[in-house]
Amino acid sequence: MKQYIIRRTGYSLLSLFLLSLTIFLFVRVTGDPTSLLLEPGASLEDIANLRRQFGLDQPLWLQYWLFVKSFLTGDLGLSFYYRTPVLDLYFERLPNSLLLAAVAMILSLVIGIPSGVLAAVHVGGFWDNAGKIFTLLGLSLPSFFIGLVLILIFTVYLGWLPSSGAGTAWHVVMPAFTLGWYFAAAHMRLTRSSMLEVLGSEYVKLARLKGLPEAMVVGKHAFKNALIPVITLAGINLVVMINVAVVVETVFAWPGIGRLLYEGITFRDFPIVQAVVVLGGSMIILVNLLVDILYAFIDPRIRLES
Amino acid sequence: MRTKTVIRLDSNESAGTDNRKPSKITRRTAMALSTLGIVELGRGTAMAASPDGQLTWAVHVSLAPTWFDPAETPGIITPFMIMYAMHDAMVKPMPGNAAEPCLAESWKAAPDKLSYEFTVRAGVKFHNGDPVTAEDVKFSFERYRGTSAAMLKARMKAVETPDARTVRFVLKEPWPDFLTFYSSATGAGWIVPKKYVEKVGDEQFKKAPVGAGPYRFVSFTPGVELVMEAFDGYWRKMPTVKRLVFRTVPEEGTRLAALKRGEVDMAYSIRGELAEDLRKTPGLTLKSVVIQAPFWLYFADQWDPKSPWHDQRVREAARLAIDYKAVSEALTLGYSPVTNSIIPDNFAFYWKPPAAVYNPAKAKELLAAAGHGRGFEAGDYYCDTSYANVAEAVINYLQVAGIRLRLRPLERAAFFSSYSQKKLKNVIQGASGAFGNAATRLEAFAVKGGAYTYGNYPDIDDLFAKQASELDEKKRTELLHRIQQIIHERSVYAPIWQLAFLNGVGKRVGESGLGLIKGHAYSAPYEDVTIKK
């Protein structure tokens, strides 16, 4: 078991190293940040001065080494655009992202799980078809489109909800629904397939043969077991929601990490992009590592096989 | 001792001196008037109602704390959106005057142009109550590290402060553009309190900035909003709006929705179809501001004898083939004026060229005379992808005349990097919003060695060298006008338009401040902004 954990941890660290190297190189491929921080026509001296300030005049390997070194000491660098420590910016935005992700997750589960159960129980029926349409739209409509349509309806025409920003409970409604719909669709699909699989299993057949009411068969025997993969997916989705709600946060001017990433990309603010991606990646790697370890604890075959 | 109480009576200013004469009245009269509520004691403060209400802007960019510190003014126009509220400059562009004395009461240049002496306005205070002194002016200049800082300091021999209200900038050699750089092209002339900065340090200053502007800092949430409140001790006038809020809303459609719902009072940068929608919405006003950003076509191959663009008739034909007004109408609702120049019309030493002409028949004639009766393959047309829509319109017009170009849009950074590294060829669609005057623009775009100059004309270089050392302003103006005239006559460039920045104004707003200062993209001066009663 110890060896298994060490190996898994090693893989995680390797993934983190590759992620940091990839994002470090990728942001630099996008171009020179000075061209966005100075007007076209700026003097060459000003451009050179800014590059020097940002350390972009150093060789790539040295820039990477400095990035890793400061990252390991908990220093994510200074934002090119805000000239503020990136860590401060990140933690200022994190509570907003957590709030948005939490509400969106609740919405996605409240919508996705019951509709998935209904669709599985009434395969081919009205609820199943309605669920398919809901899923199709949720997975295929781009979130910027959903967001703008919601703003048009609920802000411009009805005047019920604020268009953007944060601060009150009303502000979170539209962004959470926009973000949650996609994940509700994903949760619905998984609940439906998981339920169908469980409903076809021997012990459910036995429960029915015993004459248990259908509500009890579905609710007690099938639902609980079908929920396990959905909860696992929801856990990973929550991490994703926190880190990649870029479009939703931009459309609704929601001050979260997604928008911080958008700002970083817009201004070629390398330290911000690197920090958000590496921290987000670290969260996902950490969750996966914990899940791996947990599975190994639960199922000895996993650690023995590996 | 007689108390000096001042009522501001007029606002006649001329460059170099603030002509507003304080009217002196006796203590007894002042007290009587004060009791009646007619005047308020204090330099330069007219009696006005207390600031009231709040105005909110939906801003298209994320506000950066570096913009709260004039020492870090970068080479872009956006920070001035904040600086006009929070800070004040010795001399700065104001309505009707590109270099109005503000914290400086007056200034004078020595006859040999080797020094400039400024007198600090009496009785002016920072938000924390400290008086603005010559030491603060010197400190702000020496501390400045933003755009063109190295150049400014390299030319400076000394900054002297003979007394608390006098600052003298002594140059190593005459520099006719000193005032342009000190007043508008950099942040070196925007004054911060020395004592406060030294006490709190640079980093803390950005978190709790103190300035001498009409609004004082209240709070800032990165990526969300900036809140400021009226400073009742502002020397020019008491602001009428108590609270200003700048809220970042990156998405254009969301900004318009917020404006329609009344969540914000003004929304910056509403373009295209959304601008048309805004124009049609009752109660809202579309307000355009023409900024100092001309767009142009640059014929990069004109110095290559083998290129068709070497022939001046071909370049003239290209200029005549484009209906600039129609392009402006289609893309910016006609608000971007066709100035026919690469120099912004608000810049010093700007020469007004003849109006642009759209004459496709004449364009074809010129092409035929140049041996291209059936048109020709004109190569590539490079542009910044953000303005590919302009490029498409221009290419279509050129195509009709027989000039066939391939559109090569490049991502903004790649475009400007390639442009400055002289890697592009054939035709380049360029633009610049950099500060300065006609001389600084020409230096970058038309003179040998310029950052964006692909070739040169010796007579232009000679004239430019002469103007650089010419201390007589009239003669210098003539030289710079002549250069612009030559550029126009030789069709070195085909200017397209001077870009208009379109904004939405809500029904609560009285004076938006948009367009009051020529060439300035945002609301200003903020003390002039009002709410409808």
Image (cartoon, rainbow, N blue to C red):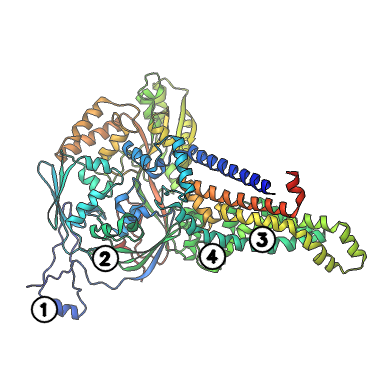
Amino acid type, mark 4: His
Q: CA distance from mark 1 to mark 3?
A: 74 Å
Task: Name the chain letter of the residue that bears numbered label 3.
Answer: A
Q: CA distance from mark 4 to mark 2?
A: 36 Å
Check if mark 1's residue and mark 2's residue have beta carbons within 8 Å: no
Q: CA distance from mark 3 to mark 2?
A: 51 Å
Badge 1 element: helix
Badge 2 element: loop
Task: Name the chain letter of the residue that bears numbered label 4.
Answer: A
Q: CA distance from mark 1 to mark 2?
A: 30 Å
Measured as percent of width and height from the top left, residue B89 is found at 24, 55
Residue denoted by label 2: B128
Amino acid type, mark 3: Ser
Lateral position of residue B464 relative to residue A188, left or right: left
Residue denoted by label 1: B28
The answer to whether dots 1 and 3 both sit on one chain is no
Q: CA distance from mark 1 to mark 4?
A: 57 Å
Residue denoted by label 4: A171
Q: Residue at x 35, y 37 (%)?
A: A48
The answer to whether dots 3 and 2 both sit on one chain is no
Task: Name the chain letter of the residue that bears numbered label 1.
Answer: B
Residue denoted by label 3: A108
